[in-house]
Image (spheres, grey):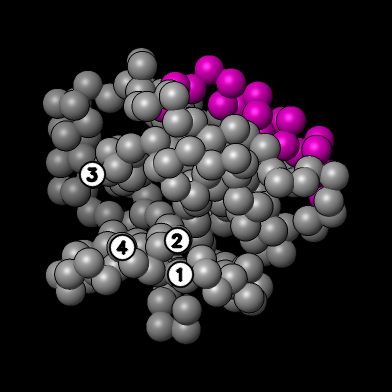
Amino acid sequence: MKTFNFEIKNPGKIKQTLSRCILRLWGWKIEGELPDAPRYLYLFEPHTSNRDGFVTYFVTVALGIRLRWLGKHTLFELKPFIGRFLIRIGGIPVDHNSPAGLVEQVANKIKQQERCILAIMPSGSRFPEPHWKSGFYRIARHAEIPVLCVYIDNQRKVVGFADFIHLTGNVKYDMDRIRLCYRTAMGDRAEINTPIRLRNEETNLG
């Protein structure tokens, strides 16, 4: 974690124009507006296809921002050039099998940045899972940043910005608000959508 810089470097005009063209060719549209906030968590769901990551990348570049995102370390080890490319587009490899201290490390890094948007897909996988991973909630609480709920609706080919939520520490209340944001979003493979719930929503995760 120490070797990665969380600071945002906005894309140039050429990349923005190219990304808009790619989205137009693919038939994707954007709903809503990004919040005017220096630091927040970009919660992107539902995640059922490899295409999801590419779509959100081009959407954010088209809008003139650059995300940092956490990915499984194995993705960065496929081939050397793939790992370097993923890092260049904002990827930060983490080992989910060694979670000790990860939340604190990420939250502390965010606090050190003047501007930082960290993207997380809390379902954690493109395969069916029983619940969302709670890391996003813990990071947002520790870093004291709000959460922007971003949905990808493959049926309508729309990426939308929904509620901008300041987590209260009341997990059930906060998750109910988050669930409302994704109630109509359809994943590319809707049959493998991960239910929008945490393992134990009665637990204090703050």
Tell me the element at label 1.
Answer: strand
Label number found at residue 94: 1
**Residues at circles 2 and 3 in contact by the CB criterion of under 8 Å:** no
Q: Residues within 10 Å of mark 3 (few under 14, many from 20)?
A: many
**Residues at circles 2 and 1 in contact by the CB criterion of under 8 Å:** yes
Kindly identify the amino acid type of the residue bearing the numbered disc 3. Gln
Kindly identify the amino acid type of the residue bearing the numbered disc 1. Val
Depth check, mark 2 against mark 4: the one in front is 4
Label number found at residue 75: 4
Q: Which residue corresponds to the image point at 55% horizontal and 74% vertical from the top-left?
A: 98
Residue 104 lies within the magenta run = no
Residue 180 lies within the magenta run = yes
Q: Is residue 169 shown left or right of residue 150?
A: right
Depth check, mark 3 against mark 4: the one in front is 4
Q: Earlier in the sequence, mark 2 or mark 3?
A: 3
Q: CA distance from mark 2 to mark 4?
A: 11 Å
Q: CA distance from mark 1 to mark 4?
A: 10 Å
The location of residue 56, given as percent across then percent down, is 35, 41
On the question of residue 88 being in view, the answer is no
Part of the protein shown in magenta: 169-187
Question: Which residue in the rendered view is the most extreme toward the bottom?
Answer: 2
Quarter of the image containing the C terminus?
bottom right
* Residue 67 in the image: above or below residue 18: below
Q: Which residue corresponds to the image point at 35% horizontal and 27% vertical from the top-left?
A: 188
Kindly identify the amino acid type of the residue bearing the numbered disc 2. Leu
Pointer 2: what residue? 70
**Residues at circles 2 and 4 in contact by the CB criterion of under 8 Å:** no
The location of residue 202, given as percent across then percent down, is 85, 44
